[in-house]
Amino acid sequence: MAHKKQKMKAKGLADKIFFIVLFTFLVLYVISILGTLFWGLLSSFKSVADIEIKKNVLGLPNPVLSAEELRFSNYAKLLDAFGFTVVNPFYQNGVMVTHYQEVTLGVTLVNTLMFTVITSIENAVLPCMAAYLCVRYPFKVSGFIYSTLLVLMVIPIVGTYPAEIEMLRSLGIYDTMIAYFIQNFNFTGMYFFIFYAYFEGLSTTYYEAAEIDGASQLMIMLKIALPLAFKLIMTIWLLRFIGHWNEYGTILLYMPTQVTLAFVIYRTFISTMNGEHSVGEVTAGCTVLAFPLVIIFICFREQLMGNLTLGGEKG
Amino acid sequence: MSQTKKINKNGMNARRRGHIIFYAALMILPCIQFAIFYFGVNISSILRAFQIYEINYSTGILEKFFTGTRGYSFFYNFKMAIDLFSNNVYVLKNTFLIYFIGLFVSQPICIILSYYIFKKKPLSGFFKVMLYLPHVISGLVFSLLFKYITENVYMVVAKDIFGATVQGILVDPNTRLGGVLFFNVWLGLSGSLLLFSGAMSSVDESVLESAQLDGANIIQEFFYIVLPGIWHTYKQLLILGVAGIFGNQMSLMSLFGIHSDITKEMATIGMFFYLKTYYAGTQIVDGVSYGILSAFGLMMTAIIAPATLLIRRLLDKYGWSTK
């Protein structure tokens, strides 16, 4: 009995140590993440003299050396990051074509909003609609679509950038925002399966009752199915909005003249390598890029962090 | 056929016809897009692997013609792609390095952290929110901040506290790789946190309770109940990890920029391919054309696609059973 008690005590102690170690690790990790972001915010209010001459890398901004920066001068200087011209020469159907775009704050903001809002709507609504149709109408083609998408998720295709770029150039839509909207006008990817699992779990009584009342198929989808899935649509829309807001690699490759905010910050970073911009200016740019998303995260964290499950797929 | 049956049959046919028209009307455009931008692009990629790109400098026109003509061998692009790879074989080492770091470091830590949150230990709710933050804020932001902290802050702290004159972690060639790997692990720790914690929450509570009553400790509970319970989710992630192995760019672009020599020196296959595609924007640069890149992509696909299916097969056969 005593031995059993001792064993239980030892087990309890081992469990406690395990969780204390994890707790410590998590605390350190959170400090590293928040500390990094806070350092960036602080540095955005420091001058070159403060950081690089006085070596004030960790402290608060010096009120004398960084007097102007404390009045957001680093943020104002970000406006100088705009006002450049992007030149994109490429061969289209064998002939050299050059696209030019003068990048201003207005152009950047419009591009950013179009890029993030429209494509994230496509990424959320189209898989939802396709999944609803496949569940609601179990035709053979629905099964074919489901199986095809499942197979495609597992079979990787490497290196289609050149073919895709050439196709866009042949169609005459390379380096345009419309091309990106067309590229995203599909229902492939894991969100289709998330919506599929959701609609599979819904009772069909709603639709049947509506049909009996004389509702058309379009009405049933728009007034019953989509509103029921609205929370999930919003979650996925938010996730994709965040993804597109932060995207710059796609722009560099597919649409170099359709500059967004993330791209401008990336370009500002490139310029820093030649010493054109100070640490304060770059961290100000980081803050501007991160701030809207932090607000979105604070306001919508329950939706963003809701569990998205793939259901019990065995495919 | 009786009149009622006939009416019913006609009614059902009309109803079914209505369903089909509605279904087709909504699905047709996305399906056409899918056909063009998935199947069309992949077929185009195969065709391009057998095309030579040459700039006619007298006319300024880019000419394309098929291999096996004008003195080029049929598999010319594949031969050039193999040469390209042979001259840059280090990309394979970097690719597998970042993959195995993710597999044996990031993912296990992520699972253990998810376990802490699943057990609803102190501040688990707060940690869950904080661990999600790197998903929300751009990797570019973290890259820039990490870069400056490991240079400016690191150098000043090393000098002031340890009296050592050092280079930035990402500047010093001796510490650069470690710095990049650390950055990827640091940001990637929370990668699948929500998926794992979601999967853990589906583990039967009664099984956990009875294990505790039987005297199972945390480690035993974790390995014998929780891990098998999340096996299906973990298996999917393992398969997707293999499938995406040639796409991982190791955050090099955001840490060093696309024009940096460091990016080229430390490139993974994913980064290497992106760089070559970017620089071949006018279709040919340094003798590397879209044709050669397409051939390179096809060869990589021929390797990774069967490997993914094999891994899937092996995991299905030898993985945990929840029965």
Image (cartoon, coloured by chain):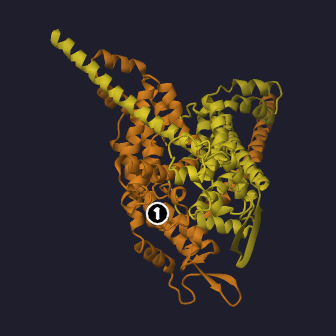
Q: Three-letter amino acid code at disc 1?
A: Ile
Report the residue at 24% width, 16% height from top.
Answer: A9
- The residue singled out by tag 1 in the image is B269
> x, y (%) of residue B123?
47, 24
Q: With A112 as the anchor, is A276 left or right in this view?
A: left
Q: Residue at x 75, y 34 (%)?
A: A221
Q: Residue B297: horizontal and vertical position, in percent?
A: 51, 66
**Residue B40 visible in rendering:** no
| Residue at 45% from the left image edge and 41% from the top image edge | B189
Instruction: Find residue A164 and report its image quarter.
Output: bottom right
Chain letter of the residue beneath label 1 in the structure image: B
Q: Quadrant of residue B319?
A: top left
Indicate left or right for B312 with A178 as reference.
left
* Residue A27 percent across, percent down from the top left: 43, 32
Q: Which chain is yellow?
A: A
Percent position of residue A229, x then y: 68, 31
Q: Nearer the viewer, residue A190 or A142?
A: A190
Give left or right: position of A284 versus B113: right
Q: Is residue A281 left or right of residue B176?
A: right
Figure disc tally: 1
Q: Colour of chain B?
A: orange
Crowdedness of circle 1 by 10 Å Cα count: few (<14), some, many (20+)?
many
Q: Farthest residue to the right: give it.
A: A214
**Residue sitting at the far front:** A64
Instruction: Name the residue nearer the viewer: A32 or B182.
Output: A32
From this view, report whether residue A61 is shown above or below residue A281: above
Asked whether residue A203 appears in the rendered view, the answer is: yes
* Mark 1 element type: helix
Q: Is residue B154 above or below residue B192?
A: below
Q: Quadrant of the N terminus of chain A?
A: top left
Quadrant housing residue B178: bottom left
